[in-house]
Structures are given as C-alpha cells and as structure tokens.
Image (tube, rainbow, N blue to C red):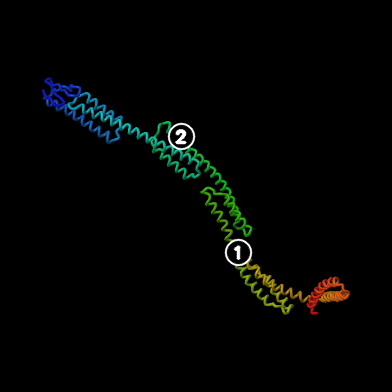
Amino acid sequence: MSSDPWGRVDETGTVYVRTADGEQVVGSWQAGSPEEALAYFERKYEGLVVEIGLLEKRVKTTDLSAKDAQAAIDHIREQVDAHHVVGDLDALRVRLDKLVQLVEARREERKAQRAKQSDEARRSKEALVAEAEELSQSDQWRAAGERLRALVDTWKGLPRLDRKSDDELWHRFSHARSAFSKRRKQHFAQLDAQREEARKTKERLVSEAEALSDSTDWGVTAARYRELMSEWKAAGRAQREHEDDLWNRFRGAQDVFFAARSSVFAERDAEQSENLKLKEELAEEAEKLLPITDLKAARAAFRNVNERWEAIGHVPRDARPKVEGRMHAVERAIQEAEEAEWRRTNPEARARAEGLTGQLQAAVDKLRGQIEQARAQGNNAKADKLQRELDGRQALLDQALKGLQEFGG
C-alpha cells in the first residue's frame, strides 16, 4: 500500500483522498504502481489549482461578467466535489468561496456603477431634452439646426435607461426636433413666398428702369429713378438665383441714363462756364459807365451791353446772382439818373412844386402873425398851440424847398 499527506492507494488499487469529512474514494488504478496512481491524481489536482488561479486573475483583471464567473466557479466546484483528484480539496473550496465573495462584490460594484451611469445618463438626456425644447423655439435656423443634429449624436452615445423612462425622454426630444423642423419649414415657405413676391415686384421695377434708360427728361427721370430705388429697397430680397441678375439689370439701366445725363451736363457745364466768362466781361464793361456823367451816352452804351448780354445763354446757377447783381446795380444807377433828370426838367412838376412852396410859405407867414397877435393879447395858450402848428408847416415848407432845388430853382 502507498500513501502521501493527501491520499493513499490500498492493496486493491483503490485511490483515496483525505478531506475534513474523512477519506473519499478518488478512483481505481490498475495500470501501474501505487506511486504512479498518486502522481496521476496529484497532477489532476494541480490542474484544478491552475484553473482556479487563472479564474481568480480573470475576475480581478478583466471585465468578466458575474454570470460567466459564477458559471466557471460552479464548474470547478463540481470537479472539486467529485473528488477525482488527490490534494487539499478543502483549500480549493476556501479559494472558491473567496472567489464567490469577490464576484459578488464586483457584481454589487458594477450594479452601483451602472446605477450611477444610469443616473448620469438620465440627467444628460434630460439636459438634452431641455436644450432641444428651448431650441425648438429659436429663429436661428442654421445654428439651431446644427445644434439639434449634434444633440442627436450625443444622445446616441449615451446608455439606454429603463424602457419607459428612455421612451418618454426620447418622445419629448423627438417632439422638440419635429416642432423646430415644422417652424423652420413654415418660415422658409413664407420666405419663399415673400421672395417670389419680391421677384415679381423687382421684375416690374426693372422693366420700368429699362424703359426710362434712354429718357432725356433729366430732372423728372432722375427723380423717378430715386423713387424706383426706394421701392426696390422696400421690396425685400428675391430668390438668390434671381436677385443678382435683377439687380444687375436694374443698376445697368440706371447707369445708362445717368451716364447720358452726365455727358449732357458736362457739355452744358462747359458751355455755361464759358457763358459766365462772357457775362463777367460785359458786367465789367457796364460798370465802367459809372459814375454817370453823360446820361444819354450811358443809356445807349448800357443798351448795347444788355443786348449782347441777352444773346448769351445760361450761366451756372450758383454764379448767376452775383453776375446779374452787377448788371442790375448799373441799371439802377442809370434809372436813378433818369429820374433825377426828369424831375429837374419836368415843367409841370416844377410848377406844382413852386405852387406848393408858395402856399406853405403864405401859411407860415400867416401863422407867425397870429402868434405875435396872441402873445400881444397875453393869450399864451393860443400862441403855443399856433406855434406847434407853425412848426409842422415849417417842416413841410423846408421839404418842399429842398425838392424845388432839384429842379434847379
């Protein structure tokens, strides 16, 4: 019979293993010596030791699920309980029990971790839903649309919650996206309608602008172009594919008109500038007639200058008052000289002036006599009243005498 600390072989070839519950039959060995029998079953035991060691390492260092780990433990435990090996089976059971505790601890740890992840995922999804619902009311169509697409990608990267919670949050999230898409679709449909209306309006404006481009009614047409530009701005933008073409046509028509007007105005400005030089020369010639010494000669000379003046066309508007004022000053001087000459040589006017002077002189002499008589009589109040009347008549007489002097009298 052969034996070691953990097993023995009896004379019949039966192999036994020693355990805390006593000896257990391992098996029968008839192929060799008892030593070989023990060695064979000891190697099988070492196989279990290695298998347990590998399982312990997997549990500690990999993400082996608790279910798979427990299945592996149960498989090894069946082999230990079957006691078809020779070795310290109780030690293996202790290791398996510790491994069960470790797997259970890992299970609880992962359960807590999953609960934490689920809670974080819930908060993240609730935040995504809240942001999506806020974005659903935005009018920043491009930015909000891009952000909503990014939120979808973020959602897809988050863990699923329990079915009810996940479905409820997804429903709100999806509804917010749909609401935004509906509003955006309505906005752009309305925008398309507005742009189509703008296109029609601008087509009409372009047609009128092109029809006016060859007009030579410069003032009226330029004013109408300004009105058309105001209408263009008020019409809003047409579709992108039409806007640039319509604008180029509209602007082109205006350019044709204003280029033609500028050409005509440039020629007119040049002509008016030349006219101004000529009129300034005539104004200078007229001013040489002053002061007037020979009225008849001055009148004839001014008439000649004025005839040449009238034959000259327009001058620039801003220069007109100054140059015409110079001519008017000479004309007024001649008119004043004519009036003075008329007064001096008009016999009827002279006679009227002399008659008025005589009447006033007689009235003054009469009042002086009345004043002297009143004072002689001691009636100073009457004298003062007559004196005031005399002062008024004397002023009129002085004025009449001055006018009479103009006639050379």
Q: Which residue is mark 1?
A: 265
Give the x, y percent position of residue 196. 55, 46
Q: Is residue 123 left or right of 309 when viewed as pictured?
A: left
**What is the number of the mark on residue 72?**
none
Residue 171, label in figure: 2
* Quarter of the picture holding the N terminus: top left
Q: What is the quadrant of the C terminus in the image?
A: bottom right
Quarter location, residue 229: bottom right
Q: Nearer the viewer, residue 241 or 75?
A: 75
Q: Earlier in the sequence, mark 2 or mark 1?
A: 2
Nearest the eye: 378 or 144: 378
Q: Amino acid at mark 1?
A: Phe
Residue 167's spot in the image, x, y percent?
Answer: 43, 33
In the image, is 380 to the left or to the right of 226? right
User: Which quadrant of the view contains residue 389?
Assistant: bottom right
Residue 102, position as x, y percentages in the image:
28, 31
Q: List the single residue furthest toward the front.
A: 378
Task: Please state which of residues 105 and 256 is positioned toward the viewer in this rendering.
Answer: 105
Residue at the spot 63% in from the left edge and 66% down from the top edge: 318
